[in-house]
Amino acid sequence: MSKNEYTPFLSEILEVKKHTELEYTFRLSFNGDVRPGQFFEVSLPKFGEAPISVSGMGDGYVELTIRKVGKVTNEIFELYKGNTLMMRGPYGNGFDVEDYKDKELIIIAGGTGVSPVRGVIEYFHKNRTQVKDMTVITGFKSPSFVLFQEDLKNWNDNMKLILTVDKEDDTPSDVCENTKELPAYQVGLVTQYIPAIKVKSKTDTAILVVGPPMMMRFTVQGLLKEGYPEENIWISHERKMCCGIGKCGHCKIDDVYVCLDGPVFPYTKGRLLVD
Amino acid sequence: MGYLLNENNFNDVIQEWQKDYLIYAPKKMLGEGMYSDTDITRYAAINDISEIEWEKKSDFSFKEVLLPLSETLFYYTEGTVKEAEANRKSGAVIFLRSCDLHAVKRLDEIYLRNGYEDFYYQRLRANVRFLVIGCSATYDNCFCVSMGTNHIDSYDAGLTINDGLFHINSHWEEMNPLFSRCSQKEAEVVIPFVTSNQINVKVPENLSIAVNSASLWKEYDSRCINCGRCNFVCPTCTCFTMQDIFYTDNGKAGERRRVHASCMVDGYTDMAGGGSYRKKNGDRMRFKVMHKVYDYKKRNGYHMCVGCGRCDDVCPEYISFSHCVNRLEDAMKEVTGNE
């Protein structure tokens, strides 16, 4: 009899970190191999399941950064430390840090797209000598939407880090608690900062681009315009998934199942996918 | 081995089978059709051979025997999860046509080989026997010959009716003594398969995703009403959506189900937070057609569509899938500019 892959296991909420009104990071007990960019099907009985990408990992835990936007995630926010969530996974391929070693690493991420690459940034922040150079550009809608503030402050010490917001908040920043101690940021789209990226050799780069579909499209366009080879670019797709294991069909694009073959794709493969 | 059985003989066989198997066959449901005073042919468990509809093509396929329309995966109470029991614990014998047995291979491909083996499918798939009914003549809208699914030998038993006798060709060795005991006589039996249909389709050899930008898809924007019936009658469509329900008497207990889903119906690609893809019906038609005759083959080496034509039979807007496939050649010319 095959293993029942649909039965979730209980995972304890070890810690909850609030980033914005809508986005929290949940540290959940988990023992097993996991890669950044992989995802778990997180579920709450009664409300259903949702695929959530891994934003961090450590001994005995994984971190999932969850945005309160649907009926599952809304309910997750009602749970706090000491409670449990149900999960199954990890699924998907994730990012393979081996692919980026000894390269000049560029990571451009927008909004919740920072979650799947956070583990990659963390890895090379700790093992900085494994890449020749490192540039990270993170973009958010406005100051009150900035995620991983503490990380952004820490990462700054050994990589080129640009934090940018599309625009200032409409309301004065002091109404948003989380904008009080923001690290220095700039205003503008991530694409504006592409020409200024300094590398020794554009062919010797590894570039990760993750974010909303439009942001990924224009970012890649910008990179190609600057002469970066498309073979050096990786992207990560986000789709509706009900199973995470190649059955339910919702995430299929052409002959590719995002849950099995992705969500991380070399751009040369990912660019051919038309929904 | 071949056996000739009369109706009583066959019912004796059925009775014997029922010790270990549920018998599923196409059955005419009176008055349950699409319009008033029309019938529908669907699969159901039968006890007697006279219940089987031999003449008409079944409107729905055998698919629900292996993939129930709605299937409870587990029950939960607070922090505990209890796996649901199978809705069928015994084996099954399914009476079906050649195209449909070809469709089983497609279901197996997705549920047993595409990623993890599916526990719930495997549970219902184990110990299922297939009895293929020969096709002496083609039905409306069938194009099995074009899809290469008109013929099959990998059945447990083949069946055809001649002069009021059931002619059975058995590959099911352990049942041969039973067939022998219940038969009028033993003889060579050849199961008929159609060698031509009224409808032929041609999937262009140069078909590629370039056809996505062809103009034909736009025509379906308004004509298709995204009801999804084509998906639900298709013997090869495998998609499902998860659904959690909880009991009104006890809000802490409930169950998770998977229910059939359709790529034509609104909401199929909707993500939390508002993202969605293929908002136009024409794009959904394109996605479905290309899956059936292009990208499934790219992944698995053979076409998904088995040419049963049920999608054409059921469409309330008279959209023809086979006609659409036959337009792909021109569509490719349009996009490659070779006209």
Image (cartoon, coloured by chain):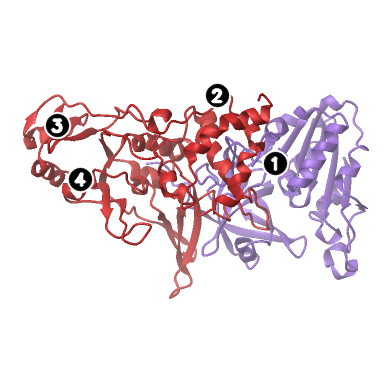
Chain colours: A purple, B red
Co-location on one chain, circles 2 and 4: yes
Q: As shown in the figure, which amino acid type bears the numbered disc 1?
A: Ser
Co-location on one chain, circles 2 and 3: yes
Label 3 vs 4, first from the N-terminus: 4
Per the image, the residue denoted by label 4 is B20
Which numbered dot is residue B205? 2
Co-location on one chain, circles 2 and 1: no
Element type at mark 2: loop
* Residue B73 higher or lower than A37, as above or below: below
User: Residue B11 in the image: x percent, y percent?
Assistant: 12, 45
What distance separates the C-alpha of mark 1 from that of mark 4?
49 Å
Q: Residues within 10 Å of mark 3 (few under 14, many from 20)?
A: some
Label 2 vs 4, first from the N-terminus: 4
Mark nearest the camera among 2 and 4 is 2
Q: As shown in the figure, which amino acid type bears the numbered disc 4?
A: Asp
User: Residue A121 in the image: x percent, y percent?
Assistant: 78, 42
Give the image quarter of residue B164: top left
Per the image, the residue denoted by label 3 is B176
Q: Residues within 10 Å of mark 1 (few under 14, many from 20)?
A: many
> What chain letter is assigned to the residue under label 4?
B
Per the image, the residue denoted by label 1 is A236
Co-location on one chain, circles 3 and 4: yes
Give the image quarter of residue B287: top right
What distance separates the C-alpha of mark 3 from that of mark 4?
16 Å
Dots 2 and 1: beta carbons under 8 Å? no
Mark nearest the camera among 1 and 3 is 3
